[in-house]
Amino acid sequence: MAKKPVQFRLNGSEKAVFVDEGQNLLDVLRRGVGDLTPKYGCGQGTCGTCTVLIDGEPHLSCLTLAETIDGRQVSTTAGLARGSELHPLQAAFMDGFAAQCGYCTPGMLMAASALLERNPDPSREDIVEAISGNICRCTGYEPIINAILAAAKAGGARRYG
Amino acid sequence: MPVKVETYDRVEEAARALSASRSARFLGGGTLVMRAVNAGDQSFDTIIRLRDPDFRTIRMQGDGLVIGAGVTMAALVANRDAVFLAPVARVIGGPAIRNMATVGGNLFASGNYGDLAVALLALGATVQLAGSGSRSMPIDEFLRDRDRHATSLVQSVTVPRPRDPATFRFTKVSRVKPKGVSLMSIAALLPQSGGRVQGARVAYGAMGPMPLRAIAVERALEGQALDAAAIDRAAALAVEGIAPPTDALASSWYRAEVAGVHLKRLLAGERR
Ligand SMILES: Cc1cc2nc3c(=O)[nH]c(=O)nc-3n(C[C@H](O)[C@H](O)[C@H](O)COP(=O)(O)OP(=O)(O)OC[C@H]3O[C@@H](n4cnc5c(N)ncnc54)[C@H](O)[C@@H]3O)c2cc1C
Ligand code: FES
Ligand code: FES
């Protein structure tokens, strides 16, 4: 089967890869470029752990045809920390025990970072809505919502832009 | 993943490629197509992609809004001319789904999906098909033969904008909020003239194999003042001529029992 060349920016650095026809973005990120932060949960769009930002907006990488991201910007959890300094969202998730098994965490972080970028001072309802496409089977969501509120207070949005 | 991807820059080319093959699927936002690819669906071997920017635009045309089939739910929510559709687009999936899911794809979504198609049906939209057989048809007709249109490319949907936005109402009944899928959705257009309903259109989602109109309800409302007695009479006919399906969310019996209740609330303008 023919491979197709695709160029995109991943967390600010240029990537050039060959993708299979029909291959999804999640697979390309994990196997093609070795970014293991987006997780494979369902491959059906229902769990949200594969959420990445494409041009700043949350998308499900498992349902994104890889070749459609040619020329676009992709952000994943791997791009959140600056060196050893955690992103305020990551710090708040740690401090607030917002990750138990951690499987949902990368998707939650990306959904939350897109929210804070757009709305640095979100209400609880805004947060619930923003993470509504992300399933967590461990925490009961409360610690996650509280962590996002705490990160917003700590200036979580300032790290972008 | 034995699928081939063909990319086109022009609508006509994509339409031709799609109509030439029984085993090709058009890629809208891909929320259902890629799901099928991931699940190893063997019923298609080719994906047709269109890069035409015009396919993703929304423009006014007289009293109507022409919405490109490639417009996403998020773009619809953000569009000022489409405010009457925002309450519908906003409850489709979660934020990531809304950034991907298109208007065109929603017309083909089956089962518990297709909330926007239900709204478009109540609003009396028309569907424009591209390609050599380029034509426009009422959405009722389009949905009735939806499977037959699987090899046609939908280019746009034209929606008459309700003169008074309060005459258009939509409700989505789901088990989980936010983001749960529809156990049923109901859309109603209730234009009034001299205090009486004139030209009512009421549509259901997840109450049959495709979005469908509640003809008995429409008839009961026609020419009536929208008062408690008329609403009760209409609600009593909620599932007249309709055989609701049984699925993972609800049984046919349950749907038939609650349809009138949800319809009544919608007609009375009650918010839940
Ligand atoms: C987690 C999840 C939650 C969802 N929640 C909802 C919900 O709440 N409400 C709801 O209505 N839907 C929901 N959906 C279903 C789906 O996302 C939407 O119906 C969406 O609008 C489908 O559009 P798409 O562009 O992604 O379709 P695609 O997957 O791209 O296409 C779907 C079908 O339509 C055909 N098609 C697409 N565009 C065209 C065109 N222009 N011309 C001809 N054929 C075309 C495709 O070939 C395919 O057969 C959900 C899906 C997921 C995965
Ligand atoms: S893996 Fe993409 S939504 Fe579950
Ligand atoms: S921490 Fe386990 S799924 Fe969320």
Image (spheres, rainbow, N blue to C red):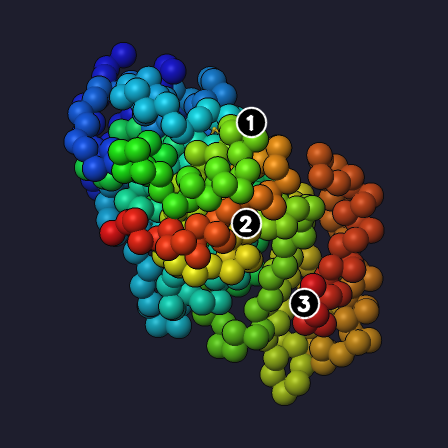
Residue at mark 1: A101
Label 2 or label 1, whichever comes before in sequence order: 1
Give the residue at x 61% y 79%: B192
In-image side of B65 versus B227 (left or right): left
Residue at mark 3: B271
> Does the numbered disc 1 mark a residue whose Cβ is under 8 Å from ligand 3?
yes
Pair 3/2: label in front: 2
Q: Residue B142 carries which label?
A: none
Query: Which quadrant of the rendered structure holds the N terminus of chain B?
Result: top left
Q: Which residue lies furthest to the top in this view?
A: A1
Q: Under tag 1, what secondary structure?
A: loop
Res B105 quadrant in image: top left
Rounded to the nearest angstrom, the CA distance separating label 3 from label 2 is 29 Å
Q: Mark 2 lies on which chain?
A: A
For the residue marked with disc 1, what is the amino acid?
Cys
Give the residue at x 69% y 63%: B272
For the residue marked with disc 3, what is the amino acid?
Arg
Q: In this view, does B114 lie above or below B240?
A: above
Give the residue at x 31% y 53%: A158
Label 2, residues with CA under 10 Å away: few <14, some 14-19, many ≥20: some
Q: Nearer the viewer, residue B84 or B210?
A: B84
Residue at mark 2: A146
**Where is residue B88 shown, x and y percent of the image?**
53, 58
**Where is residue B220 shown, x and y percent of the image?**
75, 68
> Does the numbered disc 2 mark a residue whose Cβ is under 8 Å from ligand 3?
no
Q: Under tag 3, what secondary structure?
A: loop
Rounded to the nearest angstrom, the CA distance separating label 1 from label 3 is 38 Å
Q: In this view, does B88 lie above or below B111?
A: below
Q: Is residue B151 above or below residue B140?
A: above
**Where is residue A13 shown, x and y percent of the image?**
19, 33
Specify whether disc 1 shares its chain with disc 3: no
Rounded to the nearest angstrom, the CA distance separating label 2 from label 1 is 18 Å
